[in-house]
Image: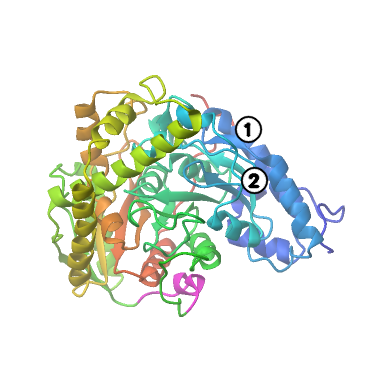
């Protein structure tokens, strides 16, 4: 089939066929001329039109951009050669840019800003690989919550239970994948924002090693490297394939990692062999583990032992106060900078009417932070990384829950509550995830079971710096042993 936008010789794609395919299968079918990429994009758009009015995971649509990019791929003869040709893609509406469109960071104060003059490097790489970006996904204001609810875009619902949170801050991405709108969606993780939504929505989510994926152009790290971009996906191989096409140094960046000896797709297809796995069951925040989460953790450990892995109890060598203090200082400084940049562009100061209550309070608190405090926090990042690197000499992987709590109800974790209530709830939802952000380690959420009321639960696996290969191999092994599924059909959902 010649590269074209449609072929009369190819059948249309119905929703059942679309939902059966992951991104890897879609791209293979397009490259072999068996699937019309225009029909593939059309099926994604149709699914979004049918499902998203209930789930609320996509806040901006860029259908025309995706169709124009498809024409460019066809004209350049790339539909047969691009590794992800024709695969529909959504990007997170958080510090990630698509030329000619706005990025709001989930904030009313940023919604009136100018359209981006350039695309982020990671978006450029997705599009160079043939992906078709047709929208953006929801996020809480400035990514400050572990639920995706905002005054600007409303509540994002969990496809497994429309009264529950989809997690945050990449809740829109995880909900879109779980709802079958796309097989894979861009996401970012600065404190658990890939892994928490993946755990709540029953999809796979891997945070790569810091600096594995590009963060620019212009700014080459987020939160001292704590924040990284990658994807949430339905299958492990999709995550591996997208990382294969998106990782690597970008022009101008002072940070990059050693070359990867082989593809991540190859890694996920092979069992890792016996691993030494440290079992971390105590939350650094001191929050008790929900009994059902604890039971799934133990069941996962038993499964791993049956696979031939060795499980040993482990304790993190990290001071909680230093860890969370340093992480809070980094994200607080980034918040102040983002708001002041917008104030300068708008020609006025932000008020309590512009920002959600928790955001406004965090802004006021962090404006008084000193240069010494920020410097000491950056030094803590190094100390945590060193301590965790030494710990990983004993283990190949650490196993823990993603969160200490079950998936919360919508409205419980938003940014419109008293600060003390917000802080206490964050201690339960981000009890395990922040360590890997501060240390820079790769870490993933793997669907691992269900609570009694039918909500998915993810378990977290963390490896040493630059060892995504181990994580992909282990995730692939777990996926083959215990495949996960999408939630029950949302063809006629009821709020």
The answer to which quarter of the image holds residue 291 is top left
Secondary-structure class at tag 2: helix
Q: Is residue 401 above or below residue 239?
A: above
Q: How crowded is mark 1: few (under 14 residues within 10 Å), some or many (20 or more)?
A: some
Image depth: mark 2 or mark 1 in front: 1
Q: Give the range drawn in magenta.
A: 262-272
Please tell me whether residue 269 belongs to the stretch shown in magenta.
yes
Instruction: Single out the residue that lies furthest toward the right.
Output: 8
Point 18% across, 58% down: residue: 280
* Residue at the (43%, 31%) spot, across then down: 343
Q: Mark number for residue 144?
A: none
Image quadrant occupied by the N terminus = bottom right
Q: Do the residues labelled 2 and 1 touch (CB within 8 Å)?
A: no
Q: Is residue 297 left or right of residue 56?
A: left
Q: Which of 328 and 485 is in front in this view?
A: 328
Q: Residue 16 carries which label?
A: 2
Q: Is residue 62 left or right of residue 318?
A: right
| Disc 1 target residue | 50
Q: Which of marks 2 and 1 is nearer the N terminus?
A: 2
Q: Position of residue 366 (x, y in %)?
A: 26, 37
Q: How crowded is mark 2: few (under 14 residues within 10 Å), some or many (20 or more)?
A: few
* Looking at the image, residue 297 lies above or below residue 15: below
State the image quarter where residue 319 is shown.
Answer: bottom left
Q: In this view, does 394 lie to the left or right of 448?
A: left
Vertical order, 114 against 388 (above or below):
above
């Amino acid at each position: 089939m010649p590269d074209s936008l449609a072929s009369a010789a190819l059948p249309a794609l119905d929703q059942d066929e679309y939902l059966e395919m992951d991104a890897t299968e879609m791209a293979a079918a397009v490259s072999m001329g068996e699937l019309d990429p225009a029909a593939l994009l059309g099926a994604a758009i149709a699914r979004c039109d049918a499902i998203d009015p209930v789930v609320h995971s996509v806040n901006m649509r860029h259908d025309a951009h995706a169709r124009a990019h498809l024409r460019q791929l066809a004209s350049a003869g790339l539909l047969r050669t691009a590794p992800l040709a024709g695969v529909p893609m959504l990007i997170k509406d958080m510090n990630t840019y698509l030329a000619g469109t706005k990025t709001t960071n989930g904030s009313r104060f940023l919604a009136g800003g100018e359209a981006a003059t350039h695309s982020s490097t990671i978006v450029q790489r997705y599009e160079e690989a043939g992906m078709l970006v047709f929208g953006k996904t929801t996020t809480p204001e400035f990514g400050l919550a572990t639920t995706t609810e905002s005054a600007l875009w409303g509540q994002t619902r969990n496809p497994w239970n429309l009264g529950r949170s989809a997690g945050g801050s990449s809740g829109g991405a995880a909900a879109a994948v779980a709802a079958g709108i796309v097989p894979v969606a861009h996401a970012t993780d600065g404190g658990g924002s890939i892994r928490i939504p993946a755990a709540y929505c029953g999809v796979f989510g891997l945070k790569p090693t810091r600096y594995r994926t590009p963060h620019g152009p212009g700014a080459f790290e987020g939160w001292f490297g704590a924040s990284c971009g990658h994807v949430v996906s339905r299958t492990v191989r999709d995550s591996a394939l997208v990382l294969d096409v998106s990782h690597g140094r970008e022009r101008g960046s002072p940070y990059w990692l050693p070359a990867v000896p082989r593809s991540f797709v190859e890694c996920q297809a092979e069992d890792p062999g016996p691993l030494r796995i440290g079992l971390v069951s105590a939350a650094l925040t001191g929050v008790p583990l929900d009994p059902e989460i604890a039971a799934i953790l133990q069941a996962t450990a038993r499964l791993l032992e049956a696979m031939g892995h060795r499980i040993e109890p482990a304790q993190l060598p990290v001071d909680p106060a230093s860890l969370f203090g340093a992480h809070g200082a980094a994200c607080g400084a980034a918040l102040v900078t983002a708001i002041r940049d917008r104030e300068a562009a708008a020609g006025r100061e932000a008020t309590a009417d512009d920002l959600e209550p928790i955001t406004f309070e965090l802004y006021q608190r962090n404006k008084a932070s000193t240069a010494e405090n920020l410097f000491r926090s950056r030094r803590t990042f190094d100390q945590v990384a060193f301590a965790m690197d030494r710990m990983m000499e004993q283990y190949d992987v650490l196993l823990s829950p993603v969160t200490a709590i079950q998936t919360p109800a919508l409205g419980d974790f938003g940014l419109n509550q008293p600060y003390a209530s917000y802080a206490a709830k964050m201690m339960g939802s981000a009890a395990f995830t922040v360590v890997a952000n501060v240390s820079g380690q790769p870490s993933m959420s793997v669907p691992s079971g269900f609570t009694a009321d039918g909500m998915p639960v993810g378990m977290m696996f963390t490896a040493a710096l630059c060892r995504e290969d181990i994580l992909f191999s282990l995730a692939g092994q777990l996926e083959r042993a215990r495949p996960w599924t999408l939630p029950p059909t949302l063809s006629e959902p009821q709020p």
